[in-house]
Amino acid sequence: MSGTSMDGIDAALIETDGEGVVRMGASVELAYTEEERALLRQALADALPMKKRTERPGVVGAAERLITRKHADIISDFLKEHDLSPEDIDVVGFHGQTVLHRPHERLTVQIGDGQALADSLGIPVVHDLRAADVAEGGQGAPLVPAYHQALVREAKLAGPVAVLNLGGVGNITYIAEGHDPVAFDTGPANALIDDLMLERSGVAMDQDARQALAGQVNQEMLVTLMTHPFFGEKPPKSLDRNAFSRETVAGLSTRDAAATLAAFTARSAAAARRWLPREPRLWIVSGGGARNPAILKFLREETGATVRTADEFGWSASMMEAQAFAYLAVRSLKGLPLTFPSSTGVPRALTGGVLATPGQSRLRA
Ligand SMILES: Nc1ncnc2c1ncn2[C@@H]1O[C@H](COP(=O)(O)OP(=O)(O)OP(=O)(O)O)[C@@H](O)[C@H]1O
Ligand SMILES: CC(=O)N[C@H]1[C@@H]2OC[C@@H](O2)[C@@H](O)[C@@H]1O[C@H](C)C(=O)O
């Protein structure tokens, strides 16, 4: 998985039948270099005029080659490190890098060449996991809810439970018995904070919320930030990485701006309750935001509920998404649904993903 924060690639091994999660295995992360990150940021800018998902304007093609190569590297290094051979792995779930996400135009673009990855690894690859949903009128995101549901089911947690993933942007999955997962994007998570820190300090992260915890939330600006029309929209709804702007906090000191943006992330997540069938009793936070104590503190204040991190349940806050795409790949092979009317708004529960078998391209040629 290479997520919207573009910090790097996460790879995780799981054993699953596509229903329950049988076993979580080892994982690894590979950070992008500053130059690679700059290329990806440029690719996001160059992708803006895209009208068809096959177009590769500007540096998008170069970024796609980078994404494919880096994923091949991380997986083959992982296999070596753990003394595994390609035959030990049934399938790789390859999300790719989202460069454009405009579901209302039925367009979502994840770059990464699944066939080339399958050929290079000698392992079948399931890729392009959002396209089918968007083609059927779904939001194409979030996709992780099916995995959240499997985890909550296995942990036998009394519902309703909210699993909040805080990556570049945030998304929530509401799980209660007898329900398909209710899920949608909540608002910003770390992307605004990262962009602020990059601009102010040259490093794209407020490590351990050192700035935010030392700052004061500007309540007036927080109210202004919450006037964004996205929060009034009824789900299903999903976000592009750059949907929100940090312009409002531009005049604040770094610590106050970081505090205000962390509070913005928490308040927008809490605002999601408006669209849930019932108030969650327990919030489980995953993604990089689980490592931001300011966001967790504000979320406790905003919701008044129990807020825990995924790690506290023996899950992995940082590897949840990588594991989820492995899980989804298996579901795809079995034709099981990846998305639901209650998650992406797709008219019926739908499977997705494209299977690339090693050597297929040569056979076709
Ligand atoms: N120790 C930390 N302190 C503060 N923030 C952190 C810490 N560790 C990670 N983060 C934040 O988490 C972000 C990465 O989160 P994550 O890996 O979940 O995102 P992603 O998978 O790229 O995004 P998405 O879920 O949107 O696709 C970083 O950009 C950073 O802002
Ligand atoms: C289009 C796209 O890549 N969306 C991401 C993004 O990052 C978080 C949020 O927005 C989520 O909807 C989605 O990723 C997660 C992994 C998902 O689909 O569940």
Image (cartoon, rainbow, N blue to C red):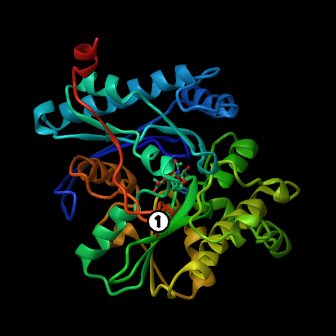
Q: Compared with residue 247, is residue 49 higher up or lower down, i.e. above or below? A: above
Q: Between 279 and 52, which is closer to the camera in this rendering?
A: 52
* Quadrant assignment for the N terminus: top left
**The image quarter in which residue 295 lies:** bottom right
Counting every numbered tag in the picture gives 1
Q: Compared with residue 218, is residue 251 higher up or lower down, i.e. above or below? A: above
Q: Residue at x 77, y 56 (%)?
A: 254
**The image quarter in which residue 107 lies:** top right
Q: Compared with residue 232, is residue 48 higher up or lower down, i.e. above or below? A: above
Q: Between 109 and 90, which is closer to the camera in this rendering?
A: 109
Position in image of residue 12 (x %, y %): 29, 47
Q: Secondary structure at mark 1?
A: loop
Position in image of residue 252 (x %, y %): 85, 59
Position in image of residue 241 (x %, y %): 63, 48
Q: Between 37 and 48, which is closer to the camera in this rendering?
A: 48
Q: Residue at x 71, y 60 (%)?
A: 258
* Quadrant assignment for the C terminus: top left
Which residue is the site of mark 1? 343
- In the image, farthest residue toward the right: 251
Position in image of residue 228 (x %, y %): 77, 65
Is residue 85 shown to the viewer in this render? no
Q: Residue at x 48, y 68 (%)?
A: 183
Left/right placement of residue 177 relative to residue 213 reads left
Q: Between 143 and 225, which is closer to the camera in this rendering?
A: 143
Q: Residue at x 56, y 81 (%)?
A: 300
